[in-house]
Image (cartoon, grey):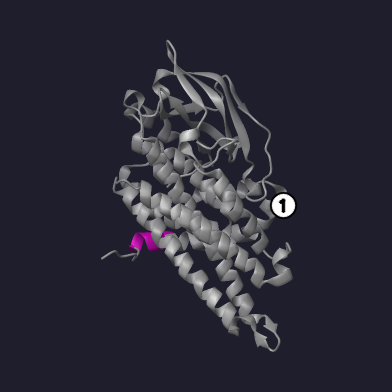
Amino acid sequence: MISFELTEEQRLAQTMAAQLARSTLRPAARDADEHLAIPPSILKEIWATGIVQSQAGAEATRSATLNAILLEELAVAGASFAIAAAAPIGFLSAIASQGSDAQKKALLPLFAGDSYQSAAVAIVEPDFAFDVSAIRTAAVKTTNGYRLSGIKGPVPLTRYCSHFLVVARFEDRLQAFIVERDAKGVIIGEKRPNIGLRALETATVTFDNVEVSIGVRLGEFAGCDVQWIVDSARTAFAAIMTGISRAVMEFVIPYTKERVVHGAALAQKQVIAFRLADMRIETDAMRWMTWKAAAILEKGGDATRQAQLACTYAREQAMWIVDEGVQMLGGHGYLRDNPVEMWYRDARTVSALEGVVGV
């Protein structure tokens, strides 16, 4: 029998993240969206949770399931905040699980400090059509290493990124390469605001014939399993979309109980009550599918099918839930006075960033 009962450690961590989301992150979400940036003080609060640094510690401190739980809680406050944690998590998880001993020794300690620092997995490309096999970025072997050419983007929080894990086509298969931000030929574009996730300061990153050493290929001569990186990213996005859905549900339920129309509360009308129940059912289903994918990843199994199912289901149901949330608020749903319109924009944008995060 499958059990979704949380351990004591998971419950404590979830409570901590939920408290941070309510007290600090949620009140800052609208301002971050309006100013197109996450305040450094908020990034410091996210870093203080230890969720990112835990990926750089011993294997016992890393848990894809716990990460999924925490990302959901952060996303309830704001999807941009959750991705600010999930981006470096995706990079570090890939290094920790598939990097060589030398790569782990060189990179993991860089993210164990007290200051927020980011890195991103760069899979998505400007003309990306949700088909990983269509990646155009290419790596060719040189005398001393590799030469990378291509464009990645949108990549979140580029001004904080010290490294990029670039997925490129190499000898008819996909491989990942660790590229420093300051490497010659790495060009960070201007930040471009999106419809949603506006606080993430996304930008394109161009790799213009970037020469890298032989030791930057993830896993070195053994290479890596890019599909595992994709599975991790899809699981993370499923957790984030679950958080967005929860935020909408938890906002509209009290609203419909208080909003009186034609002499009765909206929540008492059968059509609204049924839709609220469906919101709860779908949110729980999204969460359980996400946790199942995370559990498979954590145990080293093949999570491709489950991660794809969780991500696809969460993407579809999250859009239905946020759309219902806007409709239930009527004209108020389109006003910036309420956060539902921001969650609607965020949910629509999340899927466009496939491949830049992880658990």
**Is 7 positioned to the left or the right of 257 in the image?**
left
Residue at the spot 38% in from the left edge and 57% down from the top edge: 291
Q: Is residue 195 magenta?
A: no
Q: Residue at x 55, y 40 (%)?
A: 129
Of 138 and 144, the residue lying toward us: 138
Q: Nearer the viewer, residue 118 or 53?
A: 118
Hey, what amino acid is under mark 1?
A: Glu
Res. 292 visible in picture: yes
Asked which quadrant contains residue 300, the reply is top left
* In the rendered image, the vertical position of residue 155 relative to residue 242, given as above or below: above
Q: Total label count? A: 1
Q: Position of residue 302 (x, y in %)?
A: 31, 45
Picture coordinates of residue 272, whole percent (x, y): 59, 78
Left or right, residue 120 beside residue 108? right
Give the residue at the far bottom of this rendering: 263
Identify the magenta region: 7-13
Q: Quadrant of the N terminus?
A: bottom left
Which one is in front, 127 or 140? 127
- Extreme-top residue of the structure: 143
Image position, residue 110 (x, y; %):
46, 34
| SS for dot 1 | helix
- Report whether 187 appears left or right of 61: right
Which residue bears the numbered disc 1? 34
Query: Vertical placement of 259 versus 281: above or below?
Result: below
Q: Is any part of residue 39 visible from this angle?
A: no
Q: Residue at 59% of width from left, 36% of height from top?
A: 127
Examine the image and state in which quarter residue 266 appears.
bottom right
Q: From the viewer's perspective, is 102 left or right of 115?
A: left
Q: Please state which of residues 15 and 279 is positioned toward the viewer in this rendering.
A: 279
Within 10 angstroms of label 1, few (less than 14), some, or many (20 or more) residues? Answer: few
Residue depicted at x 55% and y 74%: 275
Q: What percent of the width, then of the height, locates residue 227? A: 39, 39
